[in-house]
Amino acid sequence: TVQKTSRFSVGSGKSEMVVTESTLFHALGAIKGVQFARREYNSTVGANGMEIELVHAKRHGFVEMATSIGMALPNEGQADILGLDELVDHIDNAASEKIDAGNSLLEDGFYEFDTLHALYPPGAYVVAKHAGGSGIDCVCQ
């Protein structure tokens, strides 16, 4: 079960959000999605000769995320989120037993909620039914 609330610790004049390891583990897929979007965005920096449509497509996801939280993107150069990679490493290490167990399930052809981030990793292509196109298959990333 995903813990849907977090508690706030207030003391010594400052307030901080306390998030459990379990909540971080359940957010791992989404956090890795942010990493993927940032990597796609940064892959366009200094990429001479890349079609403008491809640049827009690779930047779109991260630009949407950044603007939705009020993050200012650099005018030039790569975008970064301080501590993002370290957070993913921390979650991977703290939840290594759960991740290994989930990978074993996937190898045997099974999955559960906790393994969805491994079954559909950010950037993976999946075939989906287009709702507006009479159920025609389409490939999504």
Image (cartoon, grey):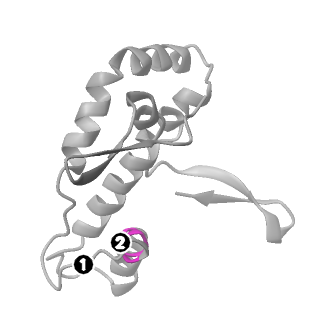
> Residue 98 location in percent, x, y?
43, 18
Numbered-mark total: 2
Q: Nearer the viewer, residue 82 or 136?
A: 82
Secondary structure, mark 1, is: loop
> Residue 78 location in percent, x, y?
16, 70
Q: Amino acid at mark 1?
A: Leu
In the rendered structure, which segment of residues is drawn in magenta? 62-67
Q: In screen coordinates, is 48 left or right of 35?
A: left
Task: Find the distance from the CA under tag 1 to the CA under tag 2.
Answer: 7 Å
> Residue 75 location in percent, x, y?
17, 86
What residue is shown at x 18% (from left), y 74% (from top)? 45
Q: Amino acid at mark 2?
A: Ala
Overall secondary structure of the magenta stretch? helix
Q: Which residue matches tag 2?
A: 66
Q: Nearer the viewer, residue 7 or 53?
A: 7
Secondary structure, mark 2, is: helix
- Is residue 35 placed above or below 72 in the rendered structure? above
Q: Is residue 91 magenta?
A: no
> Crowding near pointer 1: few (<14 within 10 Å), some, many (20+)?
some
* Farthest residue, direction right: 134
Q: Answer with the quarter of the image where residue 36 lies.
A: bottom left
Q: Answer with the quarter of the image where residue 41 lies.
A: bottom left
Q: In screen coordinates, is 92 left or right of 6?
A: left
> Residue 107 location in percent, x, y?
51, 17
Q: Nearer the viewer, residue 107 or 50?
A: 107
Specify whether residue 44 is in view. yes
Give the quadrant of the N terminus: top right
* Mark 1 / mark 2, whichever is N-terminal: 2
* Farthest residue, direction front: 12
Q: Nearer the viewer, residue 38 or 69?
A: 69
Marks 1,2: beta carbons within 8 A = yes
Q: Which residue matches tag 1?
A: 73
